Image (cartoon, helix red, strand yellow):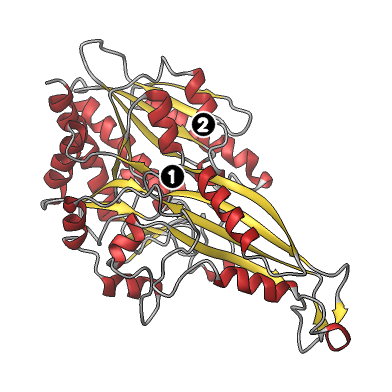
């Protein structure tokens, strides 16, 4: 396909901007410089802003005080590509197969943010922009955006805006316009279980000394009741019930239970009774074991009673749950359910608050009209199961909730081998950017 816009996407994806790996520090700077040149080329005032980590790329159109301002956020860093042997083609040698661009970062988030940039470029060629535009593209999203809140605080006045647009979420179904109006928050922790001073002979001591792996299993089993609900006392105390319109939107979602099972590669779904799979994923809180270890892991048998064990947990949270409160409840639960003969140690991980907007608000209506104009059908309103902790920073610091306009299809395999982005979605994203800016100018200007 001989399209210069795709050639630019190929250039962008070919830069191995892996923020988690120090060996790619030079590539991170090269990628930031690539964006700097691109934003300058299309006519924006652009610069790199240093942080204690990787730089932020800023691009701004000339500010017209008579116009509203839209901030467009994205990130240029990508996940590590390993395991490399599972890629059909090299992760940083992008190629098109079956109408899709394959390469690490193609759908998370280089394809989307470049579509926004090219949309602004095309709009500038047609005349003055209907709104002021600010691009904020960071290089640390894949490692937790540790320095973004500080950057927002420092540059609060310069980043003042009337709306924020982000395309880093997934479509409800392939080619289906989707506005994500809520995402779950997250709280993580590790629980370590200690028993004897060292591994013991399981025949000599078994039955008289508590086994930390068994204790860990019992603690994990205590997390849920028979209906699939989290059994931590007080866990649901702050959960905001779904409104009737939300349950209706979930029922109308093009994403079916069968499709979710197929995507996951399972024969049967599970989860909390009384809710559809779409509701469970987007609107209900969870407790998931992400890892467990202890005892002998090698080939064959080794009859030991292990000295210690561990398990890692992530809680996905919904409005109005708070990460610190959930971690406190979880600690109390495990302490109360701890079997005799072992002691527990807790290590808190990262956290982020849940996010939600009212899609019927003026900006939400403008986003829905833009999506329908580009994709030709009424958008799905979804609550996503994943977490983007920086959304609460945007709201707290800049005072604006973000509009989450999805462009990634459900089978993009973000974070996995053979990540890809449909060419059709990339080109639609360029049109969506132009439509969104026009709709926001009309709506916010009223």
Question: Is 379 above or below relative to 256?
Answer: above
Name the quadrant containing residue 174: bottom left
Say how many tags the image has: 2
Residue named by callout 1: 388
Query: Which one is in front, 185 or 125?
Result: 185
Question: Is 372 above or below relative to 131?
Answer: below
Residue named by callout 2: 148
Which residue appears at 32% of the width and 43% of the height? 5
Which residue appears at 36% of the width and 40% of the height? 114
Name the quadrant containing residue 268: bottom left
Q: Quadrant of the C terminus?
A: top left
Residue 337 in picture, x, y percent from top left: 62, 65
Q: Earlier in the sequence, mark 1 or mark 2?
A: 2
Question: Is 269 above or below relative to 251?
Answer: below
Query: Which one is in front, 70 or 303?
Result: 303
Q: Is residue 251 left or right of residue 328?
A: left
Q: Is residue 124 visible?
A: yes
SS of the residue under disc 1: loop
Which residue appears at 76% of the width and 85% of the height? 299
Residue 171 in picture, x, y percent from top left: 28, 55
SS of the residue under disc 2: helix
For label 2, the crowd category at 10 Å Cα-Cα, with few meaning under 14, some 14 to 19 and many 20 or more, is: many
C-alpha gap between disc 1 and disc 2:
12 Å
Name the quadrant containing residue 202: bottom right
Question: Is 394 above or below relative to 195?
Answer: above
Q: Is residue 99 visible?
A: no
Q: Quadrant of the N terminus?
A: bottom left
């Amino acid at each position: 396909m001989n399209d210069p816009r795709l050639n630019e996407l190929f250039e962008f994806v070919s830069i191995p901007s892996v923020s988690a790996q120090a060996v790619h520090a030079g590539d991170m700077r090269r990628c930031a410089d690539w964006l700097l040149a691109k934003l300058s080329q299309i006519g924006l005032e652009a610069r790199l802003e240093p942080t204690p980590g990787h730089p932020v790329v800023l691009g701004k159109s000339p500010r017209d005080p008579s116009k509203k301002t839209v901030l467009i956020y994205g990130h240029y860093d990508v996940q590590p590509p390993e395991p490399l042997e599972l890629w059909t083609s090299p992760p940083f040698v992008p190629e098109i197969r079956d109408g899709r661009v394959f390469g690490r970062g193609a759908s998370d988030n280089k394809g989307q943010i470049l579509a926004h940039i090219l949309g602004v470029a095309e709009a500038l060629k047609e005349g003055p922009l209907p709104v002021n535009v600010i691009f904020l593209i960071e290089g640390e999203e894949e490692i937790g955006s540790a320095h973004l809140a500080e950057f927002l605080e420092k540059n609060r006045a310069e980043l003042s805006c009337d709306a924020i647009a982000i395309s880093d979420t997934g479509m409800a179904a392939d080619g289906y316009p989707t506005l994500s109006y809520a995402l779950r928050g997250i709280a993580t922790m590790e629980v370590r279980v200690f028993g004897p001073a060292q591994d013991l002979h399981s025949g000599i001591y078994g039955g008289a000394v508590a086994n930390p792996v068994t204790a860990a299993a019992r603690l994990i089993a205590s997390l849920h009741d028979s209906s699939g609900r989290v059994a931590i006392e007080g866990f649901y105390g702050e959960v905001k019930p779904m409104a009737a319109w939300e349950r209706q939107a979930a029922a109308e979602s093009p994403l079916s239970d069968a499709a979710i099972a197929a995507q996951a590669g399972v024969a049967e779904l599970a989860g909390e009774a009384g809710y559809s799979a779409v509701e469970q994923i987007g609107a209900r809180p969870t407790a998931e074991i992400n890892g467990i270890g202890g005892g002998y892991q090698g080939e064959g048998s080794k009859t030991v009673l292990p000295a210690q064990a561990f398990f890692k947990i992530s809680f996905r949270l919904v409005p109005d749950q708070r990460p610190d409160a959930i971690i406190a409840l979880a600690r109390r639960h495990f302490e109360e359910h701890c079997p005799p003969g072992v002691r527990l140690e807790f290590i808190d991980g990262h956290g982020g608050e849940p996010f939600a907007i009212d899609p019927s608000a003026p900006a939400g209506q403008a986003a829905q009209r833009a999506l329908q104009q580009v994709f030709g059908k009424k958008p799905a309103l979804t609550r996503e199961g994943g977490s983007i902790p920086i959304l609460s920073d945007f709201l707290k610091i800049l005072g604006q909730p973000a509009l989450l306009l999805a462009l990634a299809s459900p089978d993009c395999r973000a974070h996995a081998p053979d990540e890809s982005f449909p060419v059709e979605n990339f080109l639609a994203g360029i049109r969506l950017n132009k439509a969104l800016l026009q709709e926001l100018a009309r709506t916010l200007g009223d």
